[in-house]
Amino acid sequence: MKKKHSTNFLIGFVIGALICIVVWYWQKSTAADDGALDLLDRLAAAERRLRPAPTAVSHPKAPDDLQQIHGIGPVFDGRLRQAGIDTIAQLAAVPAEQLADLLEIGANRAKAILTEAVKMD
C-alpha cells in the first residue's frame, strides 16, 4: 500500500514541476519581449533627439557621369551638357528622335542609348 502512495506522489510532483517550468518560461519570454520593445522605443526616441529635422531646402543635384552609359563617350557627353542634359534622369526623359538629332546619330542608336539610360536611372 505504501508503494502506491509514493508513486502517486512522484507523478504529482513531476506534473507540478512541469507546470512550474512552463509558467516560468512563459513569464520569462513575455518579460524579455516587453523589455526589448521598450529598449527599441527608447533607442528611437534618442535617435530623434540627436538627428536634426530634415529641412525643406532642396540642393541642386550634382551632374551625373553620362559616360557610364554604354554608347556615350566624351564627344556625346559634351553635346548633351551643352544642351542642358546633366543627369541620367534628364537623358532618360528625352525622346529618341530629339536625342538622335542632338547627337547626330541614327534613331536605333538613340533608342539603344535611351534604353541604357533608363536601366541606370
Image (cartoon, grey):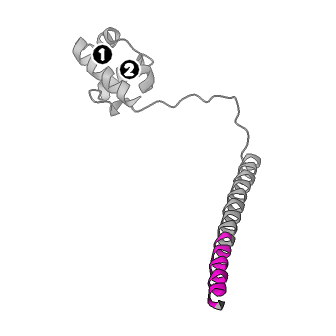
Image point 34% across, 34% down: which residue? 68
Mark 1 neighbour class, 10 Å CA radius: few under 14, some 14 to 19, many 20 or more: some
Image point 57% across, 28% down: which residue? 60
Residue furthest bottom in the image = 2
Instruction: Measure how far apart labels 1 and 2 are at the Cα level.
Output: 8 Å
- Image height of 6 relative to 101, above or below: below
The local secondary structure at tag 2 comes to helix
The local secondary structure at tag 1 comes to helix
State which quadrant residue 90 falls in: top left
- Marker disc for residue 46: none
Image point 30% across, 27% down: which residue? 72
- Image height of 13 relative to 81, above or below: below
- Image height of 58 relative to 105, above or below: below
User: Which is more toward the observer, 21 or 104?
Assistant: 21
- Give the main secondary structure of the magenta stretch: helix
User: Which is more toward the observer, 119 or 63?
Assistant: 119
88 horizontally vs 30: left or right: left
- Image height of 94 relative to 70, above or below: above
Residues in magenta, as a range: 3-19
Image point 41% across, 28% down: which residue? 121
Amino acid under label 1?
A: Leu
State which quadrant residue 105 falls in: top left
Magenta-drawn stretch contains 14: yes
Which residue is identified by label 1?
103
Which residue is identified by label 2?
80
User: Which is more toward the observer, 13 or 53?
Assistant: 13
Q: Are marks 1 and 2 in contact (CB under 8 Å)?
A: yes
* Marked residue nearer the N-terminal end (1 or 2): 2
Magenta-drawn stretch contains 35: no
